[in-house]
Every structure is written in structure tokens, then in C-alpha cells.
Image: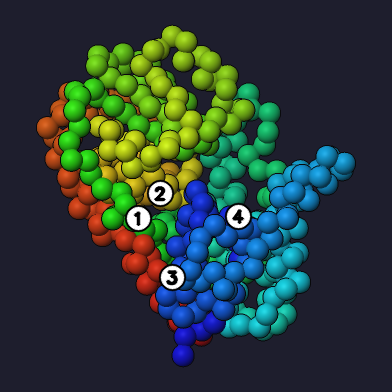
Amino acid sequence: MNPQVIFSVGVPIPGEGMGNHAYYLAAGLHRYDMLQRAFVMQYRGERPFSSAIRTAYWTERVAYRLARYTRANQYVLRDNLFDFWVARHLDRANIFYGWTHHALYSLKQAQRRGMITVLERANAHPLTTIRLLEAEYKRRGAAQPVYHPQILNKQLKELEIADYIGVTSEWTRQSLLENGIAEHRILLTPLGVDVERFVPADDVNDDIFRVLYVGQLRLRKGVQYLLEAWDALRLEKAELLLVGDVVPEFEPILRQYLPRNSTITLLGHAGDAVRVYQQASVCVLPTLEDGFGLVVLEAMACGVPVIVTNQTGAKDCVRSVIDGFILPAADSKRLAEALEYCAHHREQLAQMGRQARQQAEQFSWARYQDGVASHLKRLT
């Protein structure tokens, strides 16, 4: 008999980023008849597993009101409210599967009830992240720390007490090992992509060299190095598309580049994500730290070659020089060289795109779900 799992994540599912990942994880547990209960902030889906869902949509509203009167951090309040709510309503099951920063109190309660506990860690160990980003934040004049102190403290405690830690990349796994997490506690399962939704375009009707970035515009994502590289190149018949929300810390950097370079387009949210990928010549994830970077697999599934850094988990899916390039992080010179090569070798780039699609087909969501289920079966 398969183990029964209580799943918990303090975001709406399905959703973007974490919400997308969490949805497919919960759907996989349901597919294997393991999902006893799923605690989420909000459920936007329909069947097949809506009957197992319990929602706490009110946490966002209550946290906002409390923050106004107490000056506490709204996001810390929201995640703690969700965590307390889950802990209070836990049933008995074989396994509790919670998400980083949403699970400290529920992990403790699950262990008191005799459950095996698994913590999903979407990014590198927080101390690794601080080491990689602190100097960058200071150099760029960012007012906020890499982690809010309460968030950092909670994440460190969660990593300490969880029986097992789920990760999606070798990058995250290595960061945990380097910070003293025992190897037997780490469960590695690469993410997947919907290869039926994300498909190559039938054709692209222009000859523009179009570079695409998808994700939040923030220091952590390394977009500043992409802008430096692009500004230095001054390519003809070329366009840089930036798709995603702008975090306040990044606004001064945009003001530096946008007025003087008309080839940079800021799109905000993309209505048709697939079409945006399909129009790209190459997709770049210049991140300084990313536990995975699902946009990489989405681009590859659309037949688009990728450029990623050595500090992202998605590099596990990229075969350098075959379907993309893996470059050192924070190196605008190397990034400019790679972009210039892509711009001037369009036939080779098209071949890399075809090979990227073939590679992406190896990373289905079903394969991810199979891997998670296999890990959980072994725990019991």
C-alpha cells in the first residue's frame, strides 16, 4: 500500500513559479493515490483532487491588516499564519510534505504525531545564497538584506528538524552538503515541463535576433549582467525582451539602460507565454542563484536554445554547446561573447534549438512525479 501524504504549501495552486511546481507535485501524489490532504492558500484548479484541498485564502488579507498596525513584515506574518493554521488542522498520515518557510510549526506538529517529515527546498541553502549575493547587494546599493532575519532563522530551523529535504537540482543538493546536511536526508528529483503546451513555433516570420529573459527583474536573477552585456554589443537587427515584474531594488538599473538603448523592451507579464518563447532566438537566465529555473525547460521545449549560469539548477538539463551554453555567473563579458556568437551563427542556433526540444522531452512532469513517488515509497 502506498504511503498517505499530507501536503502543504502557502501559495495559490496552480500558479506561477512555486505555485506551478507545487501543483504538479500535489497532482503526482494524487496520481499515485498518496494524497490524503493538501493545505494551500488558494486552489484555482478543478478536479481531479479538489476534494483533498483545504484552503487558507484569508491569510493574505489578515497579514496585510496586521502589518499595517504592527509594522511587522507582511510576508513573514502571512507565511506564519498559514503554518500555524496547518499545524492546528493536521490529520494523521504516514508523511508530512511541507514547503520552505511555510512549515516550521507544522513540521514539529507532524513529528509529534509520528509522521515522517519532508521539506521541499526550492533554492540553495540560505547561507550559500547569502554568501553569493551579499556583496552584489552592497555593491548595487540595495537597501534590503538578502534574507529578512526572521525568514532566515525560520528556514535554518526547518532544514535542521526535517527528516528529509526534497530538492530539484544538483546545485541545491551540493549547497546543502556544503552546509552540513547529511547526504542521506536529501531527495533529488529534477523538475518537468509540459511538452504538449510548450512547443516549437511552426515558423518565425522575421529576421530579428531576439534575446529573451523571463522572470522577476531583480539583482538575484543577474539581469544587471545581461543588460551590461547587451549594452556593450550594440547588435543590428536585434532586440532584448525582458518579461516579468520589476522589483523596486532594480528600478535604478533599468533607468540607467532603457533611455539610451531602444532595442530593450520591457514587457511586464506576458499574456501568451508560449508565443513569447516561440518568438525568441535564444533565452537567457543570467541568475546569481536559482534552485532550478523552470523557464529554461519551458524555452527548450519551445525549441529555443538557452544560456544559463553555473549557479542555477537548470544547468542539469543543458548540454553545453549542444542545446545551449553554461557560463560563469556575474560575467557580462562571457555573456556578451555568447550572445555575439548566437547572433552571427543563426543556422547553428537553429540546430541547437531543435536539440533543445529533444532534450526537454526527457523532462516531463510525469517523470518528476514518478521520481517523487519513488522517494516517498522508500521512506516507509
Name the quadrant containing residue 192.
bottom left
User: Are circles 1 and 2 on residues that touch, CB within 8 Å?
Assistant: yes
Q: Crowding near pointer 4: few (<14 within 10 Å), some, many (20+)?
A: many
Q: Is residue 288 above or below residue 156?
A: above
**Residues under numbered marks 3 and 1 in contact, where contact means CB atoms less than 8 Å apart:** no
Q: Earlier in the sequence, mark 2 or mark 3?
A: 3
Tell me the tag on residue 294.
Answer: 2
- Tag 3, which secondary structure? helix
Label 3 vs label 1: CA separation?
A: 14 Å
Q: Residue furthest front?
A: 46
Q: What is the residue that sits farthest to the left in this orientation?
A: 347
| Residue at 60% in and 55% down | 11
Q: Residues within 10 Å of mark 3 (few under 14, many from 20)?
A: many
Q: Nearer the viewer, mark 2 or mark 3?
A: 3
Q: Give the residue pinned by disc 3.
A: 28
Establish if 317 lies above or below 108.
Answer: above
Label 2 sits on a secondary structure element that is: helix
The residue singled out by tag 4 in the image is: 11
Instruction: Tell me the amino acid under the disc marked 3.
Output: Gly
